């Protein structure tokens, strides 16, 4: 089942991921939703997703990246850059990344940047596929034994299911 069937779904994913505010999503949907550029952007994001999925699986197995992927990510980051700004913060200032989509294709900026960060900085042994859905995740748990993508999604479902099994066993 395709989870990004159209531009509205793509924008919703960006909102859910915390990459765009609800107001920005509304503005972008009004400006671009029915445009040919928006349809091409959705196709481009889905294509990038599939190429990265293949690359991540190979990288998990052997720790190498293809030159083609490196070149594509470098091209995307040059054409659709992430921006940095100083965030005052509560305790101390910090640098935060953001992007300003001026055309639908700019929506690839955070995706290319995140993929490059993953390949450059993550220990590949900590990257694995969720045992219960289609997502991959980077395990930052203390023991490094996490089996699900996030507590909000699969982790919660697994814990609820385990609790229900324990309750049935006690009742039997």
Image (tube, grey):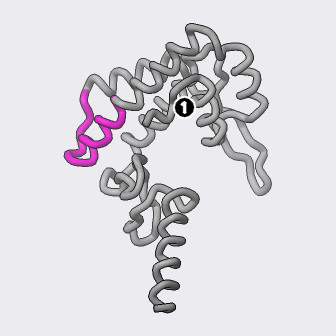
Residue 64 in magenta? yes
Residue 84 in magenta? no
Residue appearing at x 59%, y 23% in the figure: 7
Against 103, residue 162 (above or below) is: below
Residue lying at the far left in this picture: please name it.
Answer: 62
Magenta stretch: give its range.
51-66
Position of residue 12 in the picture relative to residue 141 (left or right): right
Residue appearing at x 77%, y 57% in the figure: 91
Q: Give the quadrant of residue 81.
A: top right
Residue appearing at x 33%, y 27% in the figure: 70
Against 4, residue 64 (above or below) is: below
Considering depth in this image, is 143 or 84 the residue closer to the camera?
A: 143
Residue 117 x, y percent position in the rendering: 45, 39
Mark 1: give few (<14), some (14-19) or many (20+) Cα within 10 Å.
many
Against 172, residue 5 (above or below) is: above
Q: Considering the numbered disc 1 on the image, is that residue within a helix, a strand or a loop?
A: helix
Q: Give the quadrant of residue 131.
A: bottom left
User: Circle 1 sits on which residue?
Assistant: 110
Against 119, residue 129 (above or below) is: below
């Amino acid at each position: 089942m395709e989870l990004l069937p159209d531009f509205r779904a793509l924008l919703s994913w960006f909102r859910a991921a915390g990459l765009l505010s609800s107001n920005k999503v509304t503005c972008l949907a009004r400006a671009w939703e029915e445009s040919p550029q928006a349809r091409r952007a959705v196709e481009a994001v889905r294509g990038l997703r599939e190429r990265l999925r293949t690359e991540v699986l190979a990288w998990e197995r052997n720790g190498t990246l293809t030159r083609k992927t490196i070149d594509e990510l470098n091209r995307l980051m040059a054409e659709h850059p992430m921006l940095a700004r100083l965030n005052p913060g509560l305790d101390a200032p910090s640098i935060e990344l953001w992007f300003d989509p001026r055309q639908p294709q700019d929506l690839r900026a955070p995706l290319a940047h995140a993929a490059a960060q993953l390949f450059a900085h993550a220990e590949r042994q900590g990257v694995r596929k969720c045992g219960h859905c289609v997502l991959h995740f980077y395990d930052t748990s203390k023991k490094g034994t996490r089996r699900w993508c996030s507590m909000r999604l699969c982790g919660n479902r697994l814990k609820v299911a385990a609790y229900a099994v324990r309750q049935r066993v006690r009742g039997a």
